[in-house]
Image (tube, rainbow, N blue to C red):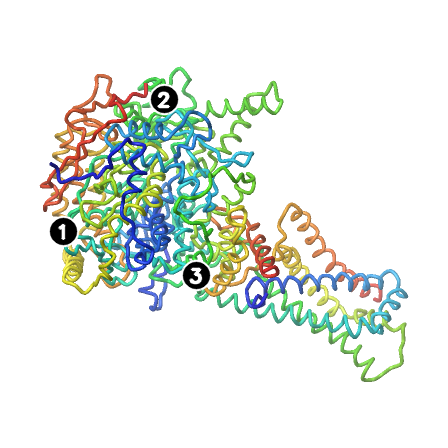
Amino acid sequence: MSVLESKIPEGPIEKKWTKHKNEINLVNPANKRNIDIIVVGTGLAGGSAAATLAELGYNVKTFCFQDSPRRAHSIAAQGGINASKNYQGDGDSDYRLFYDTVKGGDYRSREANVYRLAEVSSNIIDQCVAQGVPFAREYGGLLDNRSFGGVLVSRTFYAKGQTGQQLLLGAYSAMNRQINRGKIQSFNRHEMMDLVLVDGKARGIIARNLVTGEIERHSAHAVVLASGGYGNVFYLSTNAMGSNVMAAWRAHRKGAFFANPCFTQIHPTCIPVSGDLQSKLTLMSESLRNDGRIWVPKHEKDAKAIREGKLKPTEIAEEDRDYYLERRYPAFGNLVPRDVASRAAKERCDAGYGVNKTGQAVYLDFKAAIERYGKEKAFTSGHKNPSKEEIIKLGEEVVESKYGNLFEMYEKITDQNPYKTPMMIFPAVHYTMGGLWVDYNLMTTIPGCYAAGEANFSDHGANRLGASALMQGLADGYFVLPYTIGDYLAEDIRTGAISTETEEFEAAEKDVKDRIQRLFDAKGKNPVDYYHKKLGKIMWDKCGMSRNAKELQEAMEEIKELRDDFWANVRVTGKAETKNAELEKAGRVADFLELGELFAKDALERNESCGGHFREEYQTEDGEALRDDENFRFVSAWEYVGNPRDAKLHKEQLEFENIELKTRSYK
Amino acid sequence: MKLKLKIWRQEDAQAKGGFQNYDVDGIDGDMSFLEMLDVLNNNLVNEGIEPIEFDHDCREGICGSCSLQINGEPHGPDRRITTCQLHMRKFKDGDEIVIEPFRAKAFPVVKDLVIDRSAFDRIQHAGGYISVNTSGNTQDANSIPIEKQNADDSFYAATCIGCGACVAACKNASAMLFTSAKVSQFALLPQGEVEAHERVISMVNQMDKEGFGNCTNTGACYVECPKGISLENIARLNREYLSASVFS
Amino acid sequence: MAGISKTSIARKVAMALSGLFLVLFLAQHFTINFTSVVSPSTFNEISHFMGTNFVVQAILQPILIAGVVFHFVMGFILDIRNRKARGVGYAKFNGAANSPWVSRNMILTGIVVLAFLGLHFYDFWIPELVHKYVETHPDDPYRYYDETVAKFAGDPFRTGFYALCFIFLMLHLLHGFASSFQTMGVNNKYSGAIKTFTKAFAIVIPMGFVFIAIFHYFNNL
């Protein structure tokens, strides 16, 4: 028997959540007033959880490293949020959303969790509209939808290219209401440095006030980690500069198992890297694939000429272009899931067909869409014989109304006009499906420590579908955690306030201070970024879009060496007692240097290809991922025992009772 | 390209700050302004000097963390962008660039170029919400159709990223554009109408309490706003406030 | 309602309302003055009416004075508060990049207009008071035209200074008139038309006053 108890309720899948809600313990309102909860991270999951828990009557303390909860990186999500509302009447249902998500995740997620996610998805939209989130609407005043990769229905609700922003501001407004009532105390510019366990239960955190440098103790009856993903282990990613794994990793070191760390999503449509000093990659919304066609030159000589600047993409004739996604996947075409699209781009670039100076880019072309929309528009406005110029002008207007802000953003960054010349895109690290292992109640293997949103592993398996991250974050925060946490806290109604004047807090605080001192003591020669960039390069080259055993082993060695070098030679300037961005970065990179090794180990142990995890040794003849359901139909949950390479593997077998395991095909 | 930088340095909130001159070389036009500062900071660390602190996070113009008054303008000379989206191709070799924190009494300096914008948060705490429970027992999302124009206007108001450029650009350090965007977002929707009067009064009171200046309709805020939040919102705020004062 | 007079928006609205009131007065003043160019007798007639009518003298005039005093006192108060709101000043502030000069310098143009008012009072209003209440001359309905013209005739400096002050008034109005509508919450499909009208008014009326002054100067060379 495994130590992992997923606590999935009995019964048919569509009844599980209702049944569970009916059976779990509740805390009466008078007692909630005596219970404190810490929420780390204030993105969609943390913000919505904090607001709802405070509304229920708990005393909530939120922590975020940003200067305001509203700046959490959920704000950058562009495309949309899925919900099985079936407003379009195109046959959508909870089951279909559930099915698409499990299939999209390449059958490496937990059925019961995903079904619950689909089940509450509709409610999220109702909730957000009631809060005043201004979703896009049709002229009739009803909500509009669009379609996203990997599915055959239109179920994505959106607010132009700023859906994440609008949803986060919605969650933040709910938080504001509770802050105004005094039910939430928000600690901004605070970073969680460690988790404090008392009698094996999570009872508080040690946080650093990033302005004064003060190390603070905060106690609570339960701790919710909603601190996001760890994509920044790759240095260059679409994550915010501050996004980090510290909270999750500190919990991991204290006993929370880390699940599937190697499951990383590489998003196919990002703006390609332009130089060595680049700090961050920018995503272009997946919604662009609704209308953009992806191609590279059919002939290697053309690709070469483009790289050398001798040829322009617009000069390549239609028959000399290779629309490789449409060629390889006729059923889904440009709308295949992200992992498939990313890998296909890499395959073409590796084969020598890449464009851009670096050869690391493919085209995303709107010419066909502009012409199609232009003709339509001309026709509907009674223009029967439009000239080519008129068509293009009208078409560009339509495209502008749909994607104007994205096109503008692209032009600002690259100085190229995407209406006139195709965009260049390349895959980039975007999201991490892996995270802290949680049971059905979202509790980690540490009692009283919960993980929500991207920080946990639960719903997306080996690959996340577009517009599902926002859905999961809000589902966890608004609708799941507030119920399940009560089940645990019902035991705590007589505990009373948790004191911070205990040995455990004392020891944790000392650890944190010692660690900070060690960083200063290194007094070496290299800035923090030097290590972060090196780590990123190892990760991208050896643990990136395609992986093999040899390189993964090398990666583990190299990361370990780099880590040792870091602790010996890192140079952290300034003092611990003031605001110190270098110190903040150093602490985060130190944790990435441990996580990276576990990441490589996890990828090495998983001898199959699934979703975002592609092992070169395991592929079909035509280069598609080859899953091994017999031997790897499990969640890898790693227990910390010291060195990351020694982590102990626990397996949670995945049972598929409602969906037949199939080879994922988008052909 | 090679640049001369004149940057405000200040140890902490209490310290008296001043300008320092720095030279930076090897800057490429495709780099963002913040990447240029990264290069400078990297040089400083290598020399054992504490790097310059500045707020930044998403580096794609949406989180609203980055600020900086660059050559006398918030977010620099380009329009409809934040500092993280400002590219060095807007500058020439040999240029001198003056970099200061956003200045307002309500935005005290924390360190170097980092400022404390929690005044904005407190304005939002005062009423930036609709009092609806998050428990999920709400009516179907499509049960209230909303006129597309209003939904769109509400969305445009809601795209405010709270960066503070409006305050920084305004000669009076007024927060009217920010507050008006927050008020408008809800005032334009039927869901927000119920509490409209109470909301506008509490938010304006809080805005005044924070010590921001008065609006004198110079329009600088709109010009410098990375998201182009419209001045119509300020007129709406005035209107909402007047009607709330008279009728409640 | 209580306490609204203390908020920033209420102060702004009061500023806008008093400004609009002064704009109305300006239009009326201009109309009367303009008759001096066309018909001295009409000018004398209206001036006499304005100078002797009980309602104008005992009710409207104090309201006007209160309006003027309020507008400039409030203007100073707001400006001081607004300067304080900045705290530490910028080393470099490129206001020209994002806003018109007139909108940023209302206090400057306002002070010039105020200085003009001082001169104006010294020229006309104080002599008028002295004439009427100190020296108590008998009522003379025909003196106004000659007195007015006498101020400009043969005095290029005074005429020039008048013209200059009215240019500042124009600058003040170019921003202030349109701005008062925005402050009152008017920003809709009519805003374009309002802007055009206020701009035209801001130019035509002050330039009209300048014209009158110059007309009398040259007419009496």
Q: Is residue A603 left or right of residue A266?
A: left
Q: Is residue C216 left or right of residue B52?
A: right
Cα gap from disc 1 to disc 3, whole angstroms = 39 Å
Q: Which residue is mark 1?
A: A567
Q: Quadrant of the N terminus of chain A?
A: top left
Check contact, mark 2 vs mark 1: CB within 8 A.
no
Q: Is residue A269 above or below residue A569?
A: above
Q: Is residue A183 above or below residue A610?
A: below
Which residue type carries mark 3? Arg
Residue A432's mark? none
Q: Is residue A191 above or below residue A272?
A: below
The residue drawn where x is 20% and y is 31% is A654
Which residue type carries mark 2? Phe
Q: Quadrant location of residue A615? A: top left
For mark 3, name the chain: B
Considering only order in the chain, which callout, 1 or 2, is on the residue closer to the N terminus? 2
State which mark lies toward you, 2 or 1. Answer: 2
Q: Which residue is mark 2?
A: A332
For mark 1, name the chain: A
Q: Which residue is mark 3?
A: B103
Which residue type carries mark 1? Trp
Residue projecting furthest to the bottom:
C135
Q: Within 10 Å of the Cα at label 2, are there few (<14), some (14-19), or many (20+) other Cα atoms?
A: some
Q: Residue A416 in the image: state x and y as whole percent.
A: 43, 34
Q: Are marks 2 and 3 on the same chain?
A: no
**Is residue B97 among the parts visible in the rendering?**
no
The residue drawn where x is 42% and y is 51% is A173
Q: For the residue labelled by badge 1, is the local secondary structure a helix, a strand or a loop? A: helix
Cα gap from disc 2 to disc 3, whole angstroms = 52 Å
Q: For the residue labelled by badge 2, is the local secondary structure a helix, a strand or a loop? A: loop
Q: Residue A471 in the image: state x and y as whole percent.
A: 36, 38
